[in-house]
Image (cartoon, coloured by chain):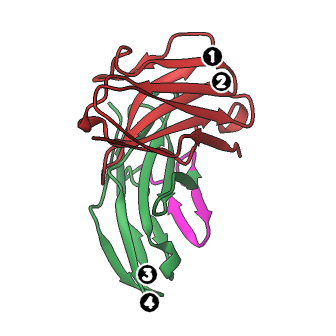
Chain colours: A green, B red
Amino acid sequence: GNSVTQMEGPVTLSEEAFLTINCTYTATGYPSLFWYVQYPGEGLQLLLKATKADDKGSNKGFEATYRKETTSFHLEKGSVQVSDSAVYFCALSDHTGGFKTIFGAGTRLFVKA
Amino acid sequence: SAVISQKPSRDICQRGTSLTIQCQVDSQVTMMFWYRQQPGQSLTLIATANQGSEATYESGFVIDKFPISRPNLTFSTLTVSNMSPEDSSIYLCSAGLDGLSTDTQYFGPGTRLTVL
């Protein structure tokens, strides 16, 4: 079955540091890949997505590239801010799963001023 | 993107009682989903609710415990029945938009439930 594995947190960085959160997936079909973000006390927000191999999703300075050869979708940001402190979820969805979304465990990010 | 609201935003309930959570979408959508997020955990899909058909439940979730209604294309409810402290979680609804973004889900703000 489909699954998502992402690096465990928490991740603690200083402001303006480089961020990488690793995510790998297992899927029987050709899934779309997502990063969602959950700020404290809030629901999930879509951060970015990619729908096919070599696509790059980007938003708010965050980027992730759909790598089919390594089944990965790592999240990166060149310079984090305190306001980026949140939990980040990698996820996949494909039509063979009835468009159900499978989520990774989540990675909590703390950014210190 | 769709705007999704949930009511209530939070509640504290006594064991043995039931709570119905409402989810409203500002546009018509075919597929709606209900998730549970236990403290510090990821999201677990409870069921898929399509208008005009019975909800489809994931392994470990049953209709008697989590009855779902989907009366129209903009609204759904999830009831948590005969609650116990183990049901304390955040419950989130989401909707997949029709059209190009069918595979992308948009989430409500969640309902934080505490069972005493």
Q: What residue type is labelled 4?
A: Ala
Residues at circles 1 and 2 in contact by the CB criterion of under 8 Å: yes
Give neighbour class at mark 3: few <14, some 14-19, many 20+ (Cα, 10 Å): few
Q: Same chain for the residues at labels 3 and 2, yes or no?
A: no
Q: Which amino acid does label 1 sit on?
A: Gln
Where does the image place residue B47, in percent across and percent down from the top left?
Answer: 44, 25
Closest to the observer, A72 or B90 = B90
- For the point 31% across and 23% down, the residue is B82
Q: Residue under circle 2? A: B30
Is any atom of residue A32 visible in this view? yes
Q: Residue under circle 1? A: B51
Looking at the figure, which quarter contains the C terminus of chain B? top left
- For the point 66% across and 39% down, the residue is B101
Residues at circles 4 and 1 in contact by the CB criterion of under 8 Å: no
Q: Residue under circle 3? A: A18
Q: In this view, does A7 lie to the left or right of B108?
A: left
Q: In the rendered structure, which segment of residues is drawn in magenta?
A: A50-68
How far is disc 1 from disc 2 in space, using C-alphas? 6 Å
Q: Residue under circle 4? A: A113
Q: Same chain for the residues at labels 3 and 4, yes or no?
A: yes
How far is disc 3 from disc 4 in space, using C-alphas? 14 Å
Magenta stretch encompasses residue A63: yes
Closest to the observer, B38 or A54 = B38
Viewer-nearest of discs 1 and 3: 1
